[in-house]
Image: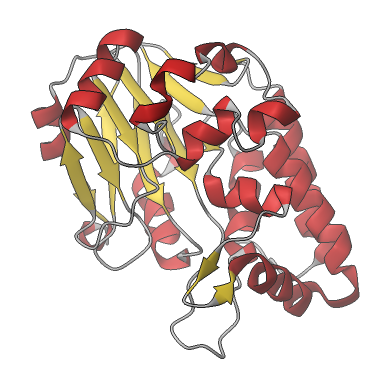
């Protein structure tokens, strides 16, 4: 773990991670692609949970596992246990950016609705509190007079993020999927380009992707057939037990004591049943 309290260090990691994200050799447009060798570890929403992140680092052991990749999303907007506690999810964000800089070919971050909302200044409220304001106050608490400089680096990083990842064995990973009512107007070409301002705004396809909910098994099956996908892995919808399954869709959560992650061997095909059996709980990691 790095010292996250030094603004210059935080900005350096965030700026470098943004450049690495845009120039990633795995990336075409807004889509990351992985071949048929190695392993990918998919996570769910993490929302500032440093404990689970530390366990993820121990499990991945990237310093001795060069064939393993890890995908993270929705790192910010921690929900404090008490109303007077700050949201310091900036700490997790900077830690992940530093991990990306240390292992640029192994660590990947996808766009999510909370990162996008913070980038666009689009309010989200939880329990009557403004999560955007709480995040900004946490950055101010951590960095003081240099908070605005750090926030500018944060927003540059968020703007660099790809939308989804796809593996050669048919697994599609993203923060969420469009609402079924938006399937007919969703522009799949958004994966072939860097997201535009219109893509990221309400009504745009990137926005639709990261904000979508209400997925039935039939809707997931329709999208799987349309996109040629064996299984979808997403987050976005809270899961008290760590995960849920909707047909070919697995919804993962990594932001609490029952949180989970999913290692995927890229050299073989999976059924959704097999993927479900491979889900690991963070509490199982020493």
The residue depicted at 35 percent of the width and 11 percent of the height is 227
From the viewer's perspective, is 88 left or right of 275? Answer: right
From the viewer's perspective, is 217 left or right of 10? Answer: left
From the viewer's perspective, is 35 left or right of 137? Answer: left
**How is the model colour-coded?**
secondary structure
The residue depicted at 64 percent of the width and 22 percent of the height is 24
The part of the image, by quadrant, that contains residue 29 is: top right
Q: Is residue 26 visible?
A: no
Looking at the image, is 163 positioned above or below residue 280? above
The part of the image, by quadrant, that contains residue 245 is: top left
Looking at the image, is 240 positioned above or below residue 222? below
Percent x, y for residue 102? 63, 41
| Front residue of this view, candidates 72 and 268 | 72
* Quarter of the figure that contains the N terminus: bottom right
* Quarter of the figure that contains the C terminus: bottom left
Q: Is residue 174 visible?
A: yes
| Front residue of this view, candidates 27 and 5 | 27
Percent x, y for residue 224? 27, 16
The residue depicted at 59 percent of the width and 21 percent of the height is 30
| Front residue of this view, candidates 185 and 161 | 185
The part of the image, by quadrant, that contains residue 81 is: bottom left
Percent x, y for residue 109? 55, 38
Percent x, y for residue 199? 65, 27
The residue depicted at 58 percent of the width and 17 percent of the height is 190
Looking at the image, is 173 positioned above or below residue 256? above
């Amino acid at each position: 773990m790095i010292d996250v309290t030094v603004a210059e260090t935080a900005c350096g990691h965030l700026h470098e991670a943004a450049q690495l994200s845009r120039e990633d050799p795995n990336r075409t447009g807004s889509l990351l692609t992985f071949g048929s060798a190695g392993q990918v570890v998919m996570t769910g929403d993490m929302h500032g949970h440093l404990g689970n992140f530390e366990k993820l680092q121990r499990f991945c052991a990237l310093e001795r596992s060069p064939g393993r990749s890890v995908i993270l999303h929705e790192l910010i907007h921690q929900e404090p246990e008490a109303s007077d506690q700050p949201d310091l999810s900036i700490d997790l964000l900077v830690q992940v950016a530093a991990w990306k800089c240390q292992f640029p070919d192994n660590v990947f971050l996808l766009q999510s609705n909370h990162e996008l909302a913070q980038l666009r200044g689009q309010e989200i409220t939880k329990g009557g509190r403004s999560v955007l304001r709480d995040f900004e106050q946490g950055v101010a608490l951590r960095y003081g007079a240099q908070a605005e400089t750090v926030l500018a680096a944060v927003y540059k990083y968020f703007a660099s993020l790809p939308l989804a990842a796809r593996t050669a064995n048919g697994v599609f990973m993203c923060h969420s999927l469009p609402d079924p009512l938006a399937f007919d107007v969703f522009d799949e070409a958004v994966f072939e380009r860097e997201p535009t301002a219109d893509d990221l705004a309400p009504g745009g396809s990137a926005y639709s992707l990261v904000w979508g909910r209400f997925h039935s098994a039939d809707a997931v099956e329709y999208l799987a057939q349309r996109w040629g996908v064996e299984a979808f892995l997403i987050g976005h919808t809270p899961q008290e037990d760590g995960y849920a399954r909707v047909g070919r869709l697995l919804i993962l959560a990594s932001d609490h004591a029952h949180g989970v992650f999913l290692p995927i061997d890229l050299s073989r095909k999976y059924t959704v049943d097999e993927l479900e059996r491979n889900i690991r709980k963070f509490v199982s990691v020493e």
